[in-house]
Image (cartoon, helix red, strand yellow):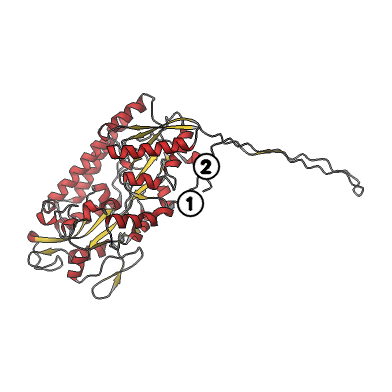
Amino acid sequence: MKSKLFVFSFLLILSMVLAACGPTAAPEVEEPAIDEPAVVEPVVEQPSGTVRWFVGLGAGSDEPQIVRQEAIVEAFNASQDEIELVLEIVPNDVAYDTLATQIAAGNAPDIVGPVGIRGRDSFFGAWLDLQPYIDQYDYDLSDFDPSMVDFYMVKEEGQLGLPFGIFPSFMMYNFDLFDEAGLNYPPAQYGEAYVMPDGTEVEWNMDTLEEVAMMLTVDANGNDATMEEFDPENIVQFGFMNQWTDPRGIGTFFGAGDFLADDGVTAQIPEPWEAAWKWTYDGWWNDWFIPNGPYGGADFLQGPGGPFSGGNLAMIHMHMWYVAPWALGEVGFEWDLGATPAYEGTITSKMHADTFSIPKSSKNPDAAFVVLTYLLSEEVAPELLKIYGGMPARLSVQDAYFEEYTAENFPGKTINWDVVVDSIAYADNPNHESFMPSFLESTDRYNEFWNKAANTPGLDMDAEIAALRVDLQAIFDAYVAGQ
């Protein structure tokens, strides 16, 4: 690693190169002596002092995690004598209020994390742009996928974090249901076509997903949703679901976007989101391949990990955190992972991710950046991720991670981990959990819209979406007026 951050001593190189050309016998005019300017390499002073590490917005406040984090702190402090790292752990249920109080009182910690996008953007505008420190210390970013570095770049805010623990999203599918229907599995890699039952190769996109999902949606008499005899009142198996996400996440399935326009005051509905919502609504009430609100509570869709683990849902779009024993360890069917389909030629695999951020009001940002890079280092980050959970963002340690993760959680099973890594390149930016004005009120309003749609057939979705935008604008206007 070319980073200079772990050299904990002063470095001063001073050299003076003098070049003078003396007279010779041949020329009639003597060349004047030329003094070259002194070449002085800038001094990068080693940061020192106390760094307060605030834990609680995300994982890390449970008792078993505390001891292991304390060991990380002790190791850092023992490795050098310039910076004292102090751990401040706050229970998650009071962490937001505690941090808000500290920032308001001018007593902000120096580093906060692990924290996800939603937690970070609950303190919108409070975070330091790390790019000047990345440049100053020549921090090596080559071990990260460039899309993940860009993921933490926020317009007009800067580089608010660096890659740490990530949870890409992708398709998951039930082998048994595909085999029973005589259908080929979803593509294992991005760029692969889907092969229809007649051998035709088609693009793996939302239209193809819908067509396949309808063939995998079955009523009590064995008819699928493509047949005239299909009975939507007695469905016993569904083809697809965006499991455990909200309208912003479902919209992002078709493309990244934001309720807030670039001007920072205008409410908008991104075109891909509107298309995704209408597609989902048709899947609920017209084409019947997605479980709607009433079907969501059906016994045949219940399992330890929600609808998919119940065994009667053929495909879901889901994040890496779901590929775990609590969700899939007890299922009675074979499953694997596949590529996210495209919408109008663009693939978007929404991302959940944790990192560490530095408040703007940190009293010791240089030392905090040293600590941050220590926590993200190739040696320490994997150990922290064993505490918090999550896939390492560092490319160099991912193979070892997947090998160990499989052996510990799904011994003997072959899992298509390649598609997980490849999904990183399609992370959503802006992220679907990003800042909104009056976050809680805005969230309540769009969830009200979504719950109505999920439980009400025959809606005019254009009118409902237009009403949502108007209401969000009123919420945003009130927020701006109160600033």
Is residue 283 shown above or below 67?
below
**Quadrant hosting residue 286:** bottom left
Q: Is residue 77 visible?
A: yes
Name the residue carrying label 1: 142
What kind of residue is marked 1?
Ser
Outermost top residue: 105
Residue closer to the observer: 205 or 146? 146
Q: CA distance from mark 2 to mark 1?
A: 14 Å
Crowding near pointer 2: few (<14 within 10 Å), some, many (20+)? few
Residue kind at label 2, given as amino acid type: Asp
Q: Residue 189: x, y in percent?
A: 34, 64
Q: On the rendered structure, is 315 left or right of 369?
A: left
Image quadrant assignment for residue 258: top left
Given contact means CB atoms under 8 Å apart, are the residues at marks 2 and 1 in contact?
no
Q: Nearer the viewer, residue 46 or 175?
A: 46
Residue drawn at x 30%, y 32% as measured from the top left: 90
Residue 345 can be seen in this image: no
Quadrant where the C terminus sits is: top left
Residue under label 2, please give it: 135
| Other residues around mark 1 within 10 Å, as few (<14) / some (14–19) / many (≥20) | few
Residue at left 17%, top 54%? 307
Q: Position of residue 246 (x, y in %)?
A: 23, 47
Q: Position of residue 416 (x, y in %)?
A: 32, 62
Q: Earlier in the sequence, mark 2 or mark 1?
A: 2
Residue 347, relative to residue 140: is it above or below?
A: below
Give how far across and how far down residue 404 sits, in percent.
34, 55
Residue 227: which quarter of the image? bottom left
- Left of 233 or right of it: where is 213? right
- Left or right of 114 on screen, residue 232: left
The kind of secondary structure element at disc 1 is loop
Q: Classify mark 2: helix, strand or loop.
A: helix
